[in-house]
Image: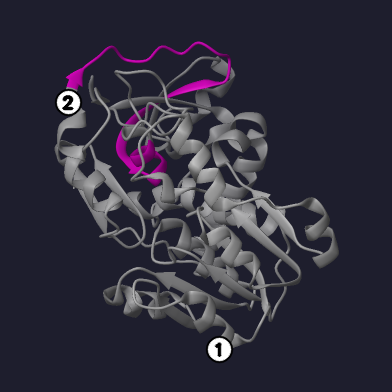
Amino acid sequence: MKAIQLIKYGDASTSFQIANISEPELVNKDDVLIQVEASGINFADVMARRGLYKAAPPLPAVLGYEVVGIVIKVKDPINNRFIGKRVLAMTRFGGYAECAISTINGIQELPKEINNGSALALATQYCTAYYAINIEMNLMEGDTVLIHAASGGVGTALTQLAKNKGCKVIGLTRSEKKVAYLKQIGVDVPIVTSSNDYVNEIEEKVGVKNVDAIFNPVGGKTVKRDLSLLNSGGKLVFFGISDRINKRKGSVNTILQLLKIGKIHPALLLLNSQSIIGVNLLKIAENKPKIIQKALNELVHLVTQGKINPTANYGFNYKEIDKAHSGLEKGLFTGKSFINWI
């Protein structure tokens, strides 16, 4: 079968090759094999390509956390009813290929009205947002939330789910060109970070320490700045560290990144009644797969009810993996990006 292999770390134009490799074997009782129609691309893939994601498999590696396709084989005959079903599947790597393995708890059958791109957005992006909003915290109607990288896949999902709960959304973007998109998806206060001090602007528009929840995939100095905005009882959800992307590998640069974030004493969180929450969806999917299955099921229902509308306008042929990766890394896209195999 054809697969996209990561063969070396670095720039998207030189890191991948299209290779013919063996079809993956079903090993565990709950394993299923998917004939892939489309594979999702995530920023974690970019981090892995740069050699900055320790959980990634050794080279040559097949990346990819989610696929849409048809179940063609199951390990346990008790699961034969899934053969021939079109599903969204979590893959825990291996998704950049014509066939990929998932598990019974990692798949969700899809109705015809949900296209491949929208379905792929539901996996990593919307599941991360759903888990953060509905399981790690309980947003209330009237809460004010701040979303970094609001035009991206997770940012779009967070915005739609927060608006669904009646929240006021502040959305950050690096590009003036994306402001219209932010307004389109429901952002109430769009802010362009490349030209403004977002802390001062937020304090002017919503008040000092009036933010109830912050969703941050950036890291670095933004963490301290975000904490200065939090209201009593506020929560900061940390689900990425894109600030690390342009730094070299190695322990020294990792330490420098930690120094930029700074020390945060638990006693200060206690005094201010604030929380910092880390969300790593891969770990949740690995250790608590039924939570992810429940989230996927609920998200599919929300789409069919018209309560959320996943954005997935950036689909590429699998041979254009370098273009897809480069655009995602440079922040050129809005919503979900993915590659097609058919």
Instruction: Give the image quarter of residue 162.
Output: bottom right
Tell me the residue at 61%/49% (across/down). 295
Q: Nearer the viewer, residue 122 or 70?
A: 122
Instruction: Give the image quarter of residue 183.
Output: bottom left
Q: Is residue 308 left or right of residue 22?
A: right
Give the mark nearer the N terminus: 1 vs 2: 2
User: Which residues make up the magenta segment?
Assistant: 19-47
Q: Amino acid at mark 2?
A: Ile
Tell me the residue at 64%/45% (across/down). 294
- The tag on residue 35 is none
Tell me the residue at 45%/47% (across/down). 110
Q: Does residue 183 lie above or below 96 as drawn?
A: below
**Secondary structure beneath label 1:** helix
- The tag on residue 204 is 1
- Please give the residue where the numbered disc 2 appears in the rendered image: 18
Separation of marks 1 and 2 at Cα, in angstroms: 51 Å
**Secondary structure beneath label 2:** strand
Q: Where's residue 242, x and y in %?
A: 42, 49
Q: Amino acid at mark 1?
A: Glu
Asked whether residue 126 appears in the rendered view, the answer is yes
- Quarter of the image with the N terminus in it: top left
Tell me the residue at 47%/57% (across/down). 154
Q: Where's residue 206, x and y in %?
A: 60, 86
- Residue 44 sits inside the magenta stretch: yes
